[in-house]
Image (cartoon, rainbow, N blue to C red):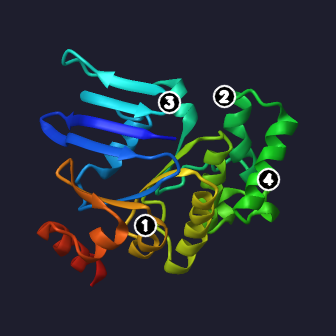
Amino acid sequence: MHIKAQDIRKAFGERPVLDGLNLEVASGETVVIIGPSGSGKSTFLRCLNGLQSIDSGTIEVGDHKLEASNGKRYSPFSSDVRKVQGMIFQDFNLFPHMSVLGNITEAPSKVLKHNRNDARNIALELLKKVGLESHANYYPAQLSGGQKQRVAIARALAMKPKVLLCDEVTSSLDPELKHEVLDVLEKLKSEGMTLLMVTHEIGFAKKAADKVVFIAEGKVVEEGPPRQILESPENQRIRTFISKLMS
């Protein structure tokens, strides 16, 4: 699903976080977003998914449009936009009192109004997709970090999104567990899912991204193919950032 963000501005009090950010993502494209801490990367994803309001600008997600006008703060809590986008966070956000199966079936049952059997069958298929079909009756406390994140992916996919937004989904995982999650995301890419990922996983970006975007101070500084941005960027700030990331 196509995404277009134009002149997105967002401030927290007097502090601007997004300062005229522009970005376009084609349907089925995998876009990796990198940049220094505090540059607005996570806030941008949250604005796309309606978890944060925007102060000005327009966001198009497929046929849905969110915009702010006349200087009024616009809160894009649109059920239509939320239905076509799933979001995965760094800290999993699983319900600790529910089994893996319960975590995945909760939203489809209550939001999409699936009956219990349909929701269960969908959840089991998704657990098979992420390699956890034998863990349906486990609870989050019984899972590793990589397993929790794969359950979070399955939970997001249960809502049948066209776009998946991933916010530092591997940053809290051990290196050997990161591959469990990245392998699932690569599979989703191969199936045509539109992916936007805030991450510092340079290896994944080189291997799977169609485009890498560098954001600093709330703006897109440079974007392009992975080889261009990660190996020979035009901007000195990006070269410095990449060298520190690789050291």
Q: Which of the two marks, 4 or 1, is nearer to us in this view? A: 4
Left or right: 52 in relation to 132: left
Q: Around disc 2, counting alpha carbons within 10 Å, would you say few (fewer than 14), some (14 to 19), or many (20 or more)?
A: few
Q: Nearer the viewer, residue 107 or 181?
A: 181
Occupied quadrant, residue 69: top left
Per the rendering, the mark at residue 125 is 4
Estimate the spatial distance between the alpha carbons at disc 4 and disc 1, rounded to whole Å.
Answer: 27 Å
Left or right: 173 in relation to 68: right
Tag 1 near tag 3, CB within 8 Å = no
Residue drawn at 64 percent across, 65 percent down: 147
Q: Nearer the viewer, residue 186 or 198?
A: 186
Where does the image place residue 154, in percent across and percent down from the top left? 66, 52
45, above or below 183, in the image: above
Q: Which residue is mark 2?
A: 111
Q: Nearer the viewer, residue 47 or 187?
A: 187
Q: Nearer the viewer, residue 82 or 61?
A: 61
Q: Secondary structure at mark 2?
A: loop
